[in-house]
């Protein structure tokens, strides 16, 4: 139990930090940065990691039932759309709030999905887990309110000729994050439905327990990457942004984006292993812990990088209250396990 919780928290911290290097890229448009990121994190890193780390890679996936490929593929395709929308939300409303709204939605819906696959735990545990999820949801609502107030604060700052980076409509960004979060719960379903077979198949090849997490990530990331490749290929051509890859800062940008890709992939794989360690309710409990840790980390990163520098005290209080609710919720969910 303790090991699983610590693994889930570590994975969440890694996910919360993954987008931070994006703030330091130069000469890239939104399409350049995120297309390269998704190419690396959805295809290059998973393929290299899977081939190198999984003994019997070809046999495991060659014998995987077509029905399971279909279930994981469709769910992961939806997850891919959701993650793509997440990147748009970050571009609209910043790192801290984009993470908060998106991940909060993922926790609320994604933590319930495994119950449909794995079955319900005992009544007392179920009640505690549901209470914890509702507390997390309340925290998300508080942070959404904080974001709307921050937008008004920044508009006022602009009127007073202060320098503020306004990326887009706060309401639009919040809506994108919520819809993206709903779609991204496909990850939770794909992990829950694919793990039993892939764990057994991996064990049969003599792999260690943790290798199952790498195996589960392979079909999820490859399937999720398809929609992103199509989306960014279209927009790079439409906006004639391919030439921006020729920037003198390409080498620096590539390293920063590769770090993003490795952190993003490793966080997901570590979560899958944490869910295994947490036992019967691991997909639900681990998912909530993982994503809440991610949000707290992202918010701290956003505060450190001055995303909330022009926000009023009221807005910041709501933000911190929302974070507190998510932390309390995660403790209640862990107790439920």
Image (tube, grey):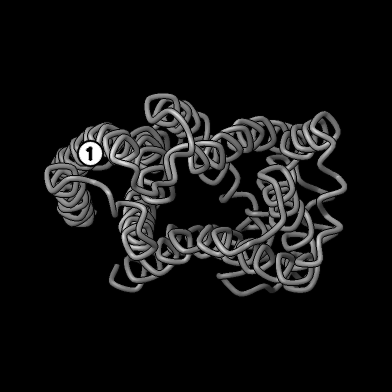
Figure quadrant of the N terminus = bottom left
Estimate the x, y position of residue 25 in percent, counting from the top left: 64, 61
Is 229 in front, or is 269? 229
Instruction: Report helix, strand or loop for mark 1.
Output: helix
Estimate the x, y position of residue 320 in percent, counting from the top left: 17, 52
- What residue do we see at 63% from left, 49% from top? 197
The single residue placed furthest to the front in the displayed view is: 161
- Is 231 left or right of 97, judged from the image as shown? right
Location of residue 47 by image quarter: bottom right
Q: Which residue is mark 1?
A: 146
Estimate the x, y position of residue 128 in percent, counting from the top left: 15, 44
Location of residue 2 by image quarter: bottom left
Figure quadrant of the C terminus = bottom left
Q: Is residue 86 visible?
A: yes
Whether residue 300 is situated above or below residue 118 in the rendered picture: below
- What residue do we see at 34% from left, 42% from top? 161
- What residue do we see at 18% from left, 36% from top? 138
Estimate the x, y position of residue 181 in percent, counting from the top left: 45, 34
């Amino acid at each position: 139990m303790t090991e699983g919780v610590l693994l889930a928290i570590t994975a969440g911290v890694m996910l919360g930090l993954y987008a931070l290097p994006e703030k330091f890229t130069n000469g890239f448009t939104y399409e350049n940065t995120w297309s390269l990121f998704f190419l690396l994190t959805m295809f290059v890193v998973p393929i290299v990691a899977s081939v190198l780390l999984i003994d019997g890679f070809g046999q495991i996936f060659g014998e995987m039932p077509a029905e399971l490929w279909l279930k994981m593929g469709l769910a992961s395709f939806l997850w891919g759309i959701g993650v793509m929308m997440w990147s748009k939300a970050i571009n609209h409303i910043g790192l801290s709030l984009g993470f908060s709204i998106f991940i909060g939605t993922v926790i609320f819906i994604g933590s319930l999905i495994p119950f449909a696959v794995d079955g319900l735990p005992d009544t007392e545990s179920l009640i505690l887990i549901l209470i914890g999820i509702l507390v997390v949801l309340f925290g998300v609502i508080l942070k959404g309110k904080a974001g709307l107030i921050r937008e008004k604060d920044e508009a006022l700052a602009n009127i007073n000729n202060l320098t503020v980076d306004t990326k887009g409509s706060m309401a639009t960004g919040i809506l994108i994050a919520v819809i993206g979060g709903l779609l991204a719960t496909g990850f939770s379903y794909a992990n829950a439905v694919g793990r039993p077979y892939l764990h057994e198949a991996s064990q049969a090849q003599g792999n260690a327990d943790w290798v199952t997490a790498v195996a589960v990530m392979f079909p999820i990331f490859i399937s999720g990457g398809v929609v992103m490749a199509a989306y960014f290929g279209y927009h790079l051509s439409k906006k004639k942004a391919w030439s921006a890859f020729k920037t003198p800062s390409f080498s620096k940008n590539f390293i920063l984006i590769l770090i993003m890709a490795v952190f993003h992939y490793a966080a997901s794989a570590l979560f899958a292993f944490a869910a295994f360690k947490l036992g019967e309710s691991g997909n639900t409990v681990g998912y909530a812990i993982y994503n809440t840790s991610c949000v707290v980390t992202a918010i701290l990163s956003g505060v450190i990088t001055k995303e909330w520098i022009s926000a009023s005290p009221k807005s910041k209080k709501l933000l911190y209250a929302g974070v507190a609710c998510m932390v309390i919720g995660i403790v209640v969910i862990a107790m439920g396990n």
